[in-house]
Image (cartoon, rainbow, N blue to C red):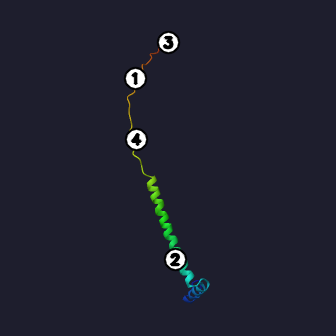
């Protein structure tokens, strides 16, 4: 009751062929294939763009300088 037999599928196929015609279905499948290839090409272009922009520059060298000693003022802590 819930499943369709081969006769049902043949009737569906005949109706689809009558509505769309044989040439129209093959044309649609060709367009579908072109769409898939365009999609894959777009993905590859996106990956290339990302890899070009994601190049990591080496870090700049760190320059360490020795701080010059400033004279320290002595404060009187005895309170006088």
Label 2 neighbour load within 10 Å: few <14, some 14-19, many 20+: few
Among numbered discs 2 and 1, the one appearing first in the sequence:
2
Q: Is residue 56 above or below residue 2?
A: above
- Describe the element under mark 2 as helix, strand or loop: helix
Label 3 belongs to which residue? 79
Q: Is residue 54 above or below residue 78?
A: below
Residue lying at the far right of the rendered structure? 19
Nearest-to-viewer mark from 2 and 1? 2
- Describe the element under mark 1 as helix, strand or loop: loop
Label 1 belongs to which residue? 69
Q: Are marks 3 and 4 in contact (CB under 8 Å)?
A: no
Nearest-to-viewer mark from 2 and 4? 2
- Describe the element under mark 4 as helix, strand or loop: loop
Q: Is residue 25 left or right of residue 77?
A: right
Label 4 belongs to which residue? 60
Among numbered discs 1 and 3, the one appearing first in the sequence:
1
| Mark carried by residue 30 | 2
Identify the residue shown where x is 53% and y is 81%. Answer: 26
Q: Is residue 52 above or below residue 17?
A: above
Among numbered discs 2 and 4, the one appearing first in the sequence:
2
Nearest-to-viewer mark from 3 and 4? 4
Label 4 neighbour load within 10 Å: few <14, some 14-19, many 20+: few
| Mark carried by residue 26 | none
> 73 or 58: nearer the eye?
58
Among numbered discs 2 and 3, the one appearing first in the sequence:
2
Q: For the residues marked 2 and 3, what is the alpha-carbon distance in whole angstroms?
A: 97 Å
């Amino acid at each position: 009751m819930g499943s369709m037999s081969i006769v049902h599928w043949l009737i569906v196929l005949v109706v689809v062929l009558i509505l769309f015609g044989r040439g129209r279905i093959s044309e649609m499948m060709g367009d579908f294939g072109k769409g898939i290839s365009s999609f894959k090409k777009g993905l590859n272009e996106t990956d290339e763009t990302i890899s070009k922009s994601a190049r990591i520059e080496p870090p700049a060298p760190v320059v360490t300088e020795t701080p010059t000693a400033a004279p320290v003022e002595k404060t009187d802590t005895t309170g006088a």
